[in-house]
Image: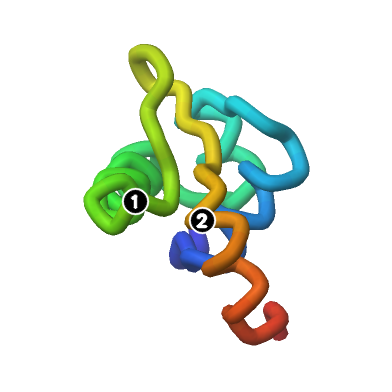
């Protein structure tokens, strides 16, 4: 398992659109609870939005924030 980076999570949501926690966790090779916690933080910051039970989407603010993050190593 790997850490759930903000960059990685926002990149996935930007590429895939609305995505379920389980799919995000599998793509990021991490536990769904880790992704849920990161999404909760990002939602509080206004970068993602939960559109239904366990499905998140990146917001316009999240897309803008993503451009300011350093590229993944």
Q: Tell me if 36 is positioned left or right of 44 in this view.
A: right
Residue 31 sits above or below residue 42 on the image: above
* Spot occupied by residue 13 in the image (x, y as percentages of width and height): 62, 43
Which residue has dot 2 on it? Answer: 62
Q: Residue at x 67, y 56 (%)?
A: 11
Q: Of the numbered discs in the image, which one, if any, rests on residue 6?
A: none
Most extreme residue toward the right is 15
Residue in the foreground of this view, choosing between 30 and 61: 61
* Mark 1 crowdedness (10 Å alpha carbons): few <14, some 14-19, many ≥20: some
Give the secondary structure at mark 1. loop
The quadrant holding residue 33 is: top left
The percent position of residue 55, horizontal first and vertical second, equals 46, 23
Label 2: few (<14), some (14–19) or many (≥20) C-alpha neighbours in 10 Å: many
The alpha-carbon separation of the residues under discs 1 and 2 comes to 7 Å
Colour scheme in use: rainbow
In this view, 51 is above or below 35: above
The kind of secondary structure element at disc 2 is helix
Query: Dots 1 and 2: beta carbons under 8 Å?
Result: yes
Q: Residue 31: image x %, image y %?
A: 40, 44
27 over 64 or under it: above or below = above
Question: What is the count of numbered marks?
Answer: 2
Q: Residue at x 45, y 66 (%)?
A: 3
Question: In the rendering, at what x and y percent does residue 44 appear?
Answer: 23, 51
**Disc 1: which residue:** 46
Picture residue at 59% right of the left edge, 30% below the top = 23
Lower sequence index among marks 1 and 2: 1
Q: Which quadrant, please, contains the C terminus?
A: bottom right
């Amino acid at each position: 398992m790997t850490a759930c980076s903000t960059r990685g999570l926002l990149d996935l949501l930007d590429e895939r659109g609305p995505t379920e926690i389980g799919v995000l966790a599998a793509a990021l090779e991490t536990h769904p609870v880790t992704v849920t916690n990161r999404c909760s933080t990002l939602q509080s910051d206004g970068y993602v939005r939960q559109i239904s039970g366990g499905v998140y989407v990146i917001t316009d603010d999240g897309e803008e924030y993503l451009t300011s993050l350093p590229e993944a190593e």
